[in-house]
Image (cartoon, grey):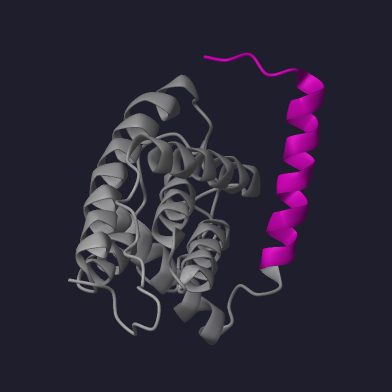
Amino acid sequence: MPIVPPGLTAAVDAFDRRADTAFDLLRGSPAADRLFYTATELGDFSLVWLIFGALRGLRSERDWHAAVRLGLAMGAETVLVNGSIKSMFRRRRPVWHSGHPLRVRTPRTSSFPSGHSTAAFSAAVLLSEDDVLWPVYFTVAAIVASSRVYVKMHHASDVIAGATLGVGLGLIGRKLAPLPPAPTLLPGATTPPS
């Protein structure tokens, strides 16, 4: 288990408490409950990312490559984060003192880092490559990641670490499995040559 300096632990704990207090201002709102509990549920097992990948894969052969790359990356991310990285840490999840207003799955792994956040930002980086929908991917990633703090399955620092790791994994995925070159338009053409 990694050794964390006590000063860093105290600063992280203070940050997490401040973030949790900020989320307390939203908790209990029916609209916020629906948004964040739905987001956290769709983030389970990378479901939302596999749906986005499948939809992208329907657009063209190049997008099909992006969808396959995403599916393989989500599997590798799960093995790496949940099978290896989380086992190095034994961080407890936040305590929820009252019942959850909506259904939520409670993982058995360490709280650090957030797997939902890692998957979300890894997927957003991979899906956003050469896609005009990139703002949608990153917006959904931010909602899924922040939902983990809202439903008290993770501390804010778990989410930030997961998001940072996810961006790094997404960039590595782009390098290891580049998409085929985009078709180029001939001068005066409106569609790529077939």
> Taking 131 as reference, is 1 above or below it?
above
Range of magenta residues: 1-23
Residue placed furthest toward the front: 187
* Residue 74 vertical placement versus 39 (above, below): above
Q: Which residue is depicted at the point 32% across and 28% down?
A: 83
Q: Camera-side residue: 89 or 102?
A: 89
**Residue 21 lies within the magenta run:** yes
Magenta: main secondary structure equals helix
Q: In which quarter of the image is residue 15?
A: top right
Looking at the figure, which quarter contains the C terminus? bottom left
Residue 82 shown in magenta: no
Q: Looking at the picture, tell me which residue is in the foreground, 150 or 132.
A: 132
Tell me the residue at 35%/30% (across/down): 80
Query: Could you tell whether 62 is left or right of 115 in the image?
Result: left
Q: Where is residue 58 in the image (x, y as percent from the top left)?
A: 19, 72
Q: Residue 185: which quarter of the image? A: bottom left
The total of numbered circles placed on residues is: 0
- Seen from the viewer's position, the closer of residues 118 and 110 is 118
Quadrant housing residue 191: bottom left
**Residue 64 versus residue 69 in the image, above or below:** below
Q: Which residue is drawn at 34% across and 61% down?
A: 182
